[in-house]
């Protein structure tokens, strides 16, 4: 017996205690690649990249056919994940954050609960949350480029996040089409909305190569888990942190910006916590808002009240119930200096997109985005009249609502919203979305600088206090979904409201109708000249300028000189960029805003707008 005990000690020392002793709780690892949607992987698309290490995990685990980021860009997606909350409900929907917001009252970032339950929590390296840094206390044992699960106590379960930037958008900010990619550019399958050019094909090929590189990097990490004897007790999640990153991917609430790859390796000692056999593909919809609840459920940790997600693995989850989940909610707001407000509902194969400011066309300039040569070429070709209708949509005003059959039309270029055969489906999904944005409620219906000034200290409480007011703003915005004669009386009421944000949305609705809203030209001129809210004046001038009824420049320049708020300045400059790049087009003289003093006080996002507009003079 003594001899057996000695042999046992030696064996444990050689292979590691974790490989020998049955863990009391599973370990959980996340492998996260940046900026890649599901369609870039062969696991989801025969023209996608081969990723043998991820494919090996899939054979020993589950592939989720319908996994979605809720936000289409990094900080918004990661804020959704870490909180378990829809970002527009908690004020974390803007990228890059201009002011951090607190976590919802009484709720912690979810690794806090794992750590409290005895887990060792580590993150290597990226966080990129839109929440106050003070809210990160007690969340991670370590979060840095040196973070590793190996520093835990003997036998301690761990949760580790390993981030990989190889597929990040910046990897495609090359200056020329060298070196030669491994992937043959002639072999790539272009999205229907992209022009078939040598540059686009080269960019696709480079990006597919990046997937193979990141797979190799993740393979080395997995080998480390194997060497440490941890595979029998460790769930390994692989997912992309949102979609992208070729033009019209990252930052946009189209399917290519939201649908992500997700594979979960299932360790043999914890197979009882998953509802399907290894190698299965799951059709039920899962969202990033569900990830926190899922990890906590796998770890046997109570899921806190206040989160929006629900677990898709662990105790209490059945395959039948999981496969009934068929709905996902998506959002896109400000991405750097470019403002937008888009919400989506996908139910089954149908995707509904609500463009609340449809005149803010997709291709409106963004400093970081247009560093990619493919973006620049695409815009140049549009301006030269060299694109077909599908390729041109990116640079033109959008409908207020669109409907797609994503199974038949994965590139979302065939809008079904005007087809009588889909009228019932359109109304069904429109109502679902209306209910979603009202029930949260959605804080983006206040202009960002207003929300931050009035509600940034406690966004959730602010939203509940203003829930009826937000619902009214949603109803005013949705007047653009009916015929103008039917909407006219209610628009008039909104423009005459004592509430400035009802006037604000009434003017956005006028901008959506365009020249049909001509009966409100005179009212808009009065508002532009004398309204007590600067941003309401800007929306009135914007409406008049987009229709060619009045020169918007005097009003907007006056307001731009008045503002002392750099967040407000950037929002105003978004209208300047829109009016400059839309027809009829206006040339703004912004020389006075290039001074060192102004640039210092309005630095960052606003100055990117100034630089672009001045370069285009």
Image (cartoon, grey):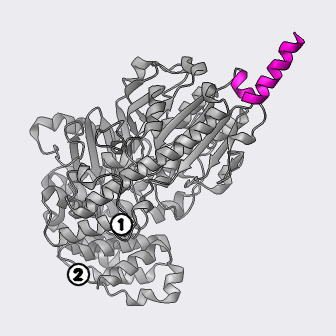
- Relative depth, front residue between 457 and 615: 615
Q: Where, by quadrant of the figure, is residue 432 drawn?
A: top left
Vertical order, 527 against 591 (above or below): above
Label annotation for residue 178? 1
Across and down, in percent, residue 49 comes to 36, 44
Q: Residue at position x 62%, y 35% from top?
A: 225
Q: Which residue is mark 2?
A: 551
Please state which of residues 421 and 563 is positioned toward the viewer in this rendering: 421
Q: Which element carries disc 2, helix, strand or loop?
A: loop
**Is 81 above or below relative to 155?**
below
Task: Decide: few, some or many residues near mark 1? Use Cα within 10 Å; few <14, some 14-19, many ≥20.
Answer: few
Q: Quadrant of residue 156?
A: top right
Residue 360 position within the rendered picture, expressed as x and y whole percent measured from the top left: 28, 63
Asked if the residue under mark 1 is in contact with the one under mark 2, i.e. CB atoms within 8 Å, the reply is no
Viewer-proximal residue, 13 or 308?
Answer: 13
Question: How far is mark 2 from mark 1, CA to CA?
Answer: 46 Å
- In the depicted view, which residue is nearer to us: 425 or 542? 425
Residue 464 x %, y %: 50, 46
Residue 351 appearing in the image: yes
Q: Secondary structure at mark 1?
A: loop
Q: Residue furthest right?
A: 2
Q: Is residue 543 above or below residue 438?
A: below
Nearer the observer: mark 2 or 1; the answer is 1
Residue found farthest to the left: 420
Residue 414 appears left or right of 14: left
- Give the magenta part as a residue range: 1-21
**Sequence-first disc among 2 and 1:** 1
């Amino acid at each position: 017996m003594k001899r057996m005990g000695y042999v046992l000690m030696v064996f444990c020392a050689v292979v590691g205690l974790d490989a020998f002793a049955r863990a009391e709780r599973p370990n959980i690892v996340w492998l996260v690649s940046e900026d890649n949607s599901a369609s870039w992987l062969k696991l989801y698309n025969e023209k996608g990249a081969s990723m043998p290490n991820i494919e090996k995990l899939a054979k020993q685990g589950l592939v989720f056919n319908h996994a979605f980021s809720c936000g289409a860009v990094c900080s918004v997606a990661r804020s959704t994940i870490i909180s378990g909350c829809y970002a527009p409900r908690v004020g974390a929907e803007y990228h890059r954050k201009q002011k951090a917001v607190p976590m919802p009252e009484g709720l912690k970032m979810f690794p806090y609960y794992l750590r409290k339950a005895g887990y060792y929590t580590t993150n290597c390296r990226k966080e990129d949350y839109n929440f106050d840094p003070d809210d990160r206390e007690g969340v991670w044992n370590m979060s840095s480029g040196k973070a590793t699960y190996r520093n835990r106590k003997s036998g301690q379960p761990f949760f580790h996040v390993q981030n990989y930037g190889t597929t990040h958008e910046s990897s495609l900010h090359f200056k020329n089409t060298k070196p030669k990619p491994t992937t043959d550019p002639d072999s790539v399958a272009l999205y229907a909305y992209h022009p078939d050019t040598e540059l686009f094909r080269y960019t696709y090929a480079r990006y597919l190569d990046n997937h193979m590189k990141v797979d190799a990097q993740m393979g080395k990490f997995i080998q480390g888990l194997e060497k440490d004897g941890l595979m029998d007790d460790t769930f390994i999640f692989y997912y992309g942190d949102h979609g992208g990153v070729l033009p019209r991917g990252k930052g946009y609430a189209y399917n290519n910006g939201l649908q992500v790859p997700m594979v979960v390796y299932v360790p043999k000692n914890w197979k009882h916590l998953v509802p399907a056999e290894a190698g299965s593909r799951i059709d039920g919809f899962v969202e990033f808002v569900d990830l926190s609840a899922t990890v906590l459920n796998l770890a046997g940790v109570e899921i806190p009240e206040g989160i929006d997600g629900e677990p898709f693995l662990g105790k209490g989850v059945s395959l039948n119930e999981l496969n009934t989940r068929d709905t996902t909610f998506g959002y896109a707001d400000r991405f750097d200096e470019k403002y937008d407000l888009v919400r989506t509902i996908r139910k089954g194969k149908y995707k509904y997109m609500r463009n609340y400011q449809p005149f803010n066309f997709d291709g409106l300039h963004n400093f970081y985005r247009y560093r990619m040569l493919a973006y620049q070429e695409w815009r140049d070709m549009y301006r030269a009249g060299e694109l077909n209708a599908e390729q041109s949509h990116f640079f033109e005003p959008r409908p207020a609502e669109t409907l797609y059959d994503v199974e038949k039309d994965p590139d979302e270029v065939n809008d079904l919203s005007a087809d009588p055969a889909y009228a019932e489906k359109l109304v069904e999904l429109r109502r679902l979305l209306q209910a979603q944005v009202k029930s949260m409620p959605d804080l983006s219906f206040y202009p960002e600088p207003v929300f931050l000034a009035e509600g940034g200290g406690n966004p959730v409480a602010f939203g509940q206090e203003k829930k009826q007011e937000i619902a009214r703003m949603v109803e005013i915005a949705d007047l653009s979904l009916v015929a103008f004669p039917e909407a006219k009386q209610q628009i008039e009421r909104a423009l005459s409201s004592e509430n400035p944000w009802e006037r604000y949305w009434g003017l956005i609705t006028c901008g959506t109708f365009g020249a049909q809203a001509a009966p409100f030209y005179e009212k808009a001129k009065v508002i532009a000249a004398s309204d007590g809210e600067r941003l309401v004046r800007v929306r009135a001038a914007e409406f008049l300028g987009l229709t060619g009824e009045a020169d918007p420049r005097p009003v907007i320049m006056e307001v731009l000189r008045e503002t002392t708020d750099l967040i407000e300045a950037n929002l105003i400059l978004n209208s300047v960029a829109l009016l400059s790049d839309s027809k009829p087009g206006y040339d703004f003289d912004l020389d006075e805003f290039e001074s060192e003093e102004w640039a210092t006080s309005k630095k960052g996002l606003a100055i990117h707008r100034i630089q672009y507009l001045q370069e285009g003079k």
